[in-house]
Image (cartoon, grey):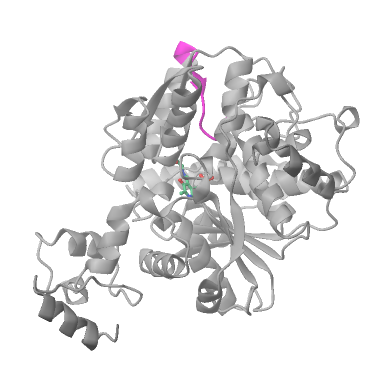
Amino acid sequence: MNQACRATYSISQTLVDCSKCGHLLDIAYDWSRIPVPGSMRQFESRWSSRRNPLDFSGVWRFRELLPFAKDEQIVTIGEGQTILQSSAGVGKYAGFQSGKLLLQYEGLNPSGSFKDNGMTAASTHAHMVGAKVAACASTGNTSASLAIYSSTTRLFETIVFIGSGKISFGKLSQALDYGAKTLQIQGDFDDALRQVRDVCAARGIYLCNSVNPFRLEGQKSIMFRVLEGLNWEVPDWIVVPGGNLGNSSAFGKAFTELKELGLINRIPRLAVINASGSNTLYQLFEQHKLRWNGGRLDEAKIITDKFFTQMDADNRRASTLATAIEINRPVNLLKCLRALEVCDGVVREVSDELILEAKAQIGAGGFGCEPASAASVAGAKLLREQGVISPSDRVVCILTGHQLKDPTATVAYHSVDPARLSAAAATEDDAYATMLRKAGVTQTPAANRPIVVENKFESIMALLDRIGC
Ligand code: F0G
């Protein structure tokens, strides 16, 4: 990534950062030696050969655009069968003209989140280098994804490191059920990530977090499928939740390469959305004006180191109901700055209250998602209100994870008694109200509250009359 360094390493190595400059590595290709199709439309020929698992995969059917493995080395479990759809209700809610807001629904992946796009690529590289054990730290989705690749392919054992407390049950249950060795670190995600990096380096374990550059190669394919869904037209905006910033970094790399290859004629703008309780990128980019700045990474590092030192001194820790993106030190921060530059990007923060409201709108619009994913729609709505995005712009929001990942947040939002959200009325034994109140949620206007009714035919009939059914 560090353009001043330019050290190169062989594909048979398992490094994540450069031993010379210390920055994260990028995968670079000599495109002159790769048979890249002359247009994106040529990839459509693979729709008719779906019995070939590589052509079926929504990642590997674009394999000439992530050409680091031979076909026989590729590890795939049918990831990337995801769809781009418009939702009239969600578009209207966010303030867009009909058909202009589209949702890229990544919850349809085998483990229920976008992570499978990257994990198929990391698993492929792990297989190429003969790894026997793979590991990751996770807020839940990365661990579910790595665990499913391990259990279905049996190519390697898996150890997942998770922080204490905040992982949602849907995700924890996946890691346990898929048989991953699950270590609950007494700390948060950032602690778990620091530990897993050290442990992997000391034991020669293959690391599958998004510091692994192969992960990002796979995640580029989300953008290839967005273009495919738009009949190869480039949208005006991509809006994505920001956590460890792997997705946004991968999207920027995808568009840079497609433009260089002449496969697209312009690059969409990028909006990365933080939860306001976990807003490192927002603070650094929008408030401290930190920029990629032509890749002068040493200057950027001084600013970020100072920011993190202050964060520790103030004992500021990320806290959001969108637990997937509850992250203090996003590891791909600098790569994300590069993506923001390439895509003329913006960063915004949205409150948990708005995230949950957007999530309920997305659910009512026919698509369920987990809280972190809904930050994209909440962010698009905010940017619309601010006049940054116009109502006629074509906007793609990435729904990163499935609704069933975090049922607690969903049930809490829909079933809590709004009166209990005021501090005065709250009692500690009302678990949902306490959870929402701590996250600053004061109202639930999009809630679809369950209706309690007597176990009596007549009462149910009378109720149906009352609610007009
Ligand atoms: N949305 C969901 C559902 C996620 O699980 C994550 C990250 C993000 C958004 C943020 O994506 O890191 O590429 O900016 N989850 C990681 C995990 C951290 O461990 O599962 P990002």
Question: Left or right: 328 with respect to 431?
Answer: right
Total numbered circles: 0
Residue 423 sits in which quadrant? Answer: bottom left
Question: Left or right: 328 with respect to 34?
Answer: left
For the point 38% across and 38% down, the residue is 189
- Viewer-nearest residue: 4 or 437: 437
| Residue 167 in sight in this render | no
- Viewer-nearest residue: 147 or 391: 147
In the image, residue 246 above or below residue 388:
above
In the rendered image, the quadrant that contains the C terminus is: bottom left
Question: Left or right: 421 with respect to 288?
Answer: left
Point out the residue furthest to the front here.
Answer: 457
For the point 31% across and 26% down, the residue is 183
Secondary structure mostly taken by the magenta-highlighted segment of the chain: loop
Query: How far across and how far down the image is residue 108, in percent?
Result: 51, 48
In the image, residue 388 above or below residue 56:
below
For the point 51% across and 22% down, the residue is 153
- Viewer-nearest residue: 363 or 452: 452
In the rendered image, the quadrant that contains the N terminus is: top right
Extent of the magenta region? 202-212
Residue 465 sits in which quadrant? Answer: bottom left
Query: How far across and how far down the image is residue 254, in percent?
Result: 72, 45
Query: How far across and how far down the image is residue 7, in percent?
Result: 74, 23
Q: Is residue 204 magenta?
A: yes
Question: Left or right: 261 with respect to 386?
Answer: right
Query: How far across and how far down the image is residue 220, in percent?
Result: 67, 43
In the image, residue 103 above or below residue 342:
below
| Residue 384 in sight in this render | yes
Q: Is residue 185 magenta?
A: no
